[in-house]
Image (cartoon, helix red, strand yellow):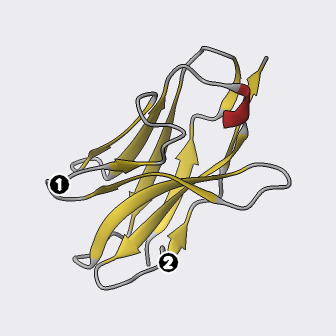
Amino acid sequence: QVQLVESGGGLVQAGGSLRLSCAVSGRTFSSYAMGWFRQAPGKEREFVAAITWTIGPTNYADSVKGRFTISRDNAKNTVYLQMNSLKPEDTAVYYCASRDAGQFEYSYWGQGTQVTVSS
């Protein structure tokens, strides 16, 4: 079973940067893609970014495009989210998630890490 452990959240001023990490264990041949999602108080969970474990395009929510970068280190089984030019509206609990090949949902989720961006 895939297990995800997130780290790197914290408090940062607007315009600052944070890098989130997601350590993945139990990854199998069916593990296909990793995604980052976030959920702010009073809002639904929203997609942020995604990447596959093989060569291919990444994709981003329009709200973070040009500011956030998703990356991976296959040897370390770790996925990162580099967040630059942070805005107060980026404040949320950030989750990493794993999606298997042939699935249309992300089946495994991390515990979440709080990101707070002050004005």
Question: Of the residues shown, which amino acid type is indicated by label 2?
Answer: Ser
Q: Which mark is residue 107?
A: 2
User: Does residue 71 appear to the left or right of 87 in the view shown?
Assistant: left
Residue 111 is tagged as none
Residues 113 and 57: in front is 57
Q: Position of residue 2 (x, y in %)?
A: 43, 72
Residue under numbered circle 1: 56
Which residue: 51% across, 72% down? 108
Q: Is residue 39 above or below residue 87?
A: below
Compared across the picture, whether 50 is left or right of 56 comes to right
Residue shown at the point (61%, 57%) measured from the top left: 46
* Of the image marks 1 and 2, the number of the one nearer the N terminus: 1
Image quarter where the N terminus lies is bottom left
Residue 87 on image: x %, y % = 66, 25
Type of amino acid under label 1:
Gly
Secondary structure beneath dot 2 equals loop
**Disc 1 versus disc 2: distance between alpha carbons?**
21 Å
Q: Residue at x 47, y 41 (%)?
A: 21
Q: Position of residue 53 (x, y in %)?
A: 24, 59
Residue 12 image offset from top left, x and y in percent: 69, 20
